[in-house]
Amino acid sequence: MPINFHDKRNRMTYTTRTADVSWLSLIEEHVGIAGKAIVDIGCGGGIYTKALASSGAAHVTGVDFSNEMLQGAARHCENLSNVTLQQGNAYNSGLPNHTFDIVLERALIHHLHDLHGCFQEAKRILKPNGVFIIQDRTPEDCLMPGDENHIRGYFFKKYPKWIDMERSRRHEAAEVQRSLVSNGFVILYTVQLWETRSIHQDLDALNRDLAQRTGRSILHELTDHELGELIMFINSKLKNSTAPIIEKDSWTLWIAVSK
């Protein structure tokens, strides 16, 4: 069954990683963080909230619809005086008009059907000429073949029944672009990023991470038995890989400015 973001057992599932330096470098290159007021909508466990707050942002507001996720984020971002967390959602953040220099929505829009409502809310809270960063996987990003880096690709090799489900919940790049433009944004950049998700010291470490379904909502669609079979399948593919295993995911980022 799908992940329940309101279940306290999942509170810490999105707090176990740190943002990769490749991600921070890309954001700094195209946008700049220093001194900015930023909101991270759909912040989950606060991984990217913390990264931005620790990289020179004046203040970062993390917003999530789940109180359990926010409790995890609070623990993850503890001792950061320039972080505020509040409950809200992509359609109604509860934040004031025209307040933020940057709005980040990472790994969020595939959970949403109404891009128009989401983008209108981002525009409302952005300052004029504020920057909107959307990061998500298109169907093409998700369905790349598996290899020793792109572990996710093996999910669909083992369970091809997931392919249609994944296509149905992912937005095509052209759809995202059309919705941005129709809601008054000018797209500055469309960027592809292979972001390092995690470095596993060996295959056993990867197996433990998969078994816990850590930060991978799609694995909650599997029974424990099916998950065990998936892990065995991945092990058969990676048995000759050298350690460490550097797991990466393909992402598309749209960087737009509010006019």
Image: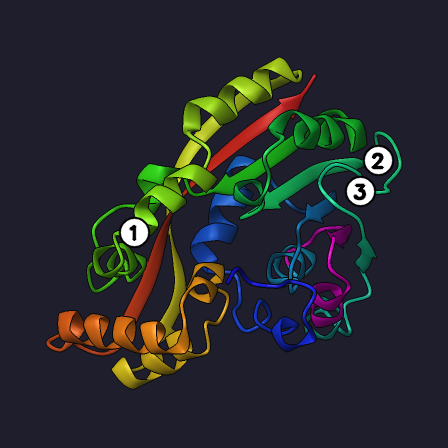
| Of marks 2 and 3, the one in the foreground | 3
Q: CA distance from mark 3 to mark 1?
A: 35 Å
Q: Residues within 10 Å of mark 3 (few under 14, many from 20)?
A: many
Q: Which residue is mark 3?
A: 93
Q: How is the image coloured?
A: rainbow
Q: Quadrant of residue 172?
A: top left
Count how many numbered circles sit on residues in the image.
3
Mark 1: secondary structure = helix
Give whichever of 180, 8 is nearer the camera: 8
The amino acid pointed to by label 3 is Ser
Are discs 2 and 1 less than 8 Å apart at CB?
no
Q: Earlier in the sequence, mark 2 or mark 3?
A: 3
On the rendered structure, is 102 left or right of 32? right
Give the residue at x 24% y 60%: 154
Give the image location of residue 127, x and y in percent: 79, 28
Mark 3: secondary structure = loop
Q: Which residues are magenta?
A: 55-72
Q: Which residue is mark 1?
A: 161
Give whichever of 245, 138 is nearer the camera: 138
Q: Earlier in the sequence, mark 3 or mark 1?
A: 3
Q: Which residue is mark 2?
A: 99
Q: Quadrant of residue 146?
A: bottom left
Q: Residues within 10 Å of mark 2 (few under 14, many from 20)?
A: some
Mark 2: secondary structure = loop
